[in-house]
Image: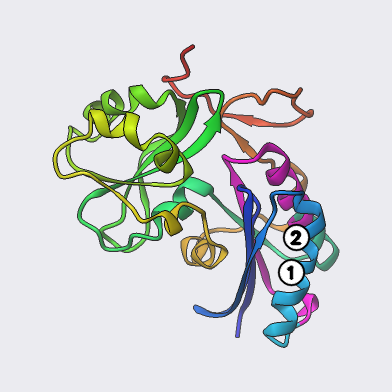
């Protein structure tokens, strides 16, 4: 049966998972606070060995393309592209906000994943998960936490939401001041995307074939403090105010 390997390096906590069809065989979560490059490959190796698989057995690769850690995204995507290119395997991607929303399937309220973007800003998306998988209401944007209530009133008609992610945890007091009645914050352990959920999100999604991998780049919502490399995807949000 079809074998999939997924990895996420968008946060200081990373994860890798392998699945046979829709059955998760193994998932490894690792601390990447030092550097993703030092912990990612050992985690991949441990995950495959635990599932009694080899990298050559993998039929498809999945990766989170952003937003998140600038360096982490580059390392994760470069690793997946290398795995896929050598073995001529397809790659499927999803955003970190989408994967966070996938932790709340069949929920009637809108899911609002929020990732800490530093510099007093967050990355925000809005998703409907009533069908089981996330459907985008608001594409990822960068915004100041105090502007979130205004965005929700505009894009979600003031309806209640579930906040999740590192940004929701960090700016809970600011967000909560203007929180719509009926809205709530998720438990802390749902603040990080999971590779197992990435597999679920990308199941059935059209892949990027190995011949087109060179065009696959991280999703950066805003330019980082450091200078950007040559090819990048920028998707600035309207709330990117100083």
- Name which residue lies at 80% across and 77% down: 56
Cβ–Cβ below 8 Å for labels 2 and 1? yes
Give the left or right position of residue 10, taking residue 197 as reference: right
Cα separation, mark 2 vs mark 1, equals 6 Å
Q: Residue at x 42, y 43 (%)?
A: 169
Task: Say if 136 sits above or below 147 in the image.
Answer: below
- Report the quarter where the N terminus lies: bottom right
Residue designated by label 1: 44
Tell whether 134 sits left or right of 70: left
Please, is residue 46 above or below residue 175 in the view?
Answer: below
Image coordinates for residue 80, horizontal then vertical, percent: 74, 58
Q: Quadrant of residue 6?
A: bottom right
Examine the image and state in which quarter residue 38 appears. bottom right
Residue 149 is situated, as x and y percent measured from the top left of the image, at 27, 27
Q: Nearer the viewer, residue 23 or 16?
A: 16
In the image as oriented, which residue stretches furthest toward the front? 173
Q: Is residue 62 above or below residue 176?
A: below
User: On the image, numbered disc 2 is attached to which residue?
Assistant: 40
Spot occupied by residue 39 in the image (x, y as percentages of width and height) = 77, 60
List the single residue furthest toward the right.
86
Q: Helix, strand or loop at disc 2?
A: helix
Residue 151 on image: x %, y %: 30, 26
Residue interval drawn in magenta = 54-80
Q: Is residue 65 magenta?
A: yes
In the rendered image, residue 111 lying in the magenta stretch gets the answer no
**Height in image: 67 above or below 20?**
above
């Amino acid at each position: 049966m079809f074998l999939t390997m997924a990895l996420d390096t968008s946060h200081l906590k990373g994860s890798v998972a392998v699945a046979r069809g829709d059955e998760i065989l193994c998932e490894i979560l690792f601390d990447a606070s030092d550097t993703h490059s030092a912990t990612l490959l050992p985690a991949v190796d441990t995950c495959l060995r635990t599932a009694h698989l080899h990298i050559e057995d993998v039929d498809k690769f999945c990766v989170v393309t952003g937003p998140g850690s600038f360096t982490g995204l580059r390392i994760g995507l470069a690793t997946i592209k290398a795995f896929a290119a050598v073995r001529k395997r397809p790659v499927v991607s999803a955003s970190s906000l989408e994967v966070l929303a996938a932790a709340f399937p069949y929920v009637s309220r809108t899911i609002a994943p929020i990732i800490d973007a530093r510099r007093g800003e967050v990355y925000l998306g809005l998703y409907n998960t009533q069908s089981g998988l996330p459907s985008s209401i608001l594409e990822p944007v960068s915004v100041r936490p105090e502007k979130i209530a205004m965005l929700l009133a505009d894009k979600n008609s003031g309806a209640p939401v579930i906040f999740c992610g590192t940004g929701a945890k960090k700016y809970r007091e600011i967000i909560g001041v203007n929180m719509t009645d009926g809205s709530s914050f998720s438990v802390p352990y749902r603040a990080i995307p999971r590779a197992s959920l990435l597999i679920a999100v990308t199941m059935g999604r059209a892949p990027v074939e190995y011949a087109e991998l060179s065009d696959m780049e991280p999703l950066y919502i805003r330019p980082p403090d450091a200078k950007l490399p040559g090819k990048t995807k920028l998707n600035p949000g309207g709330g990117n105010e100083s």
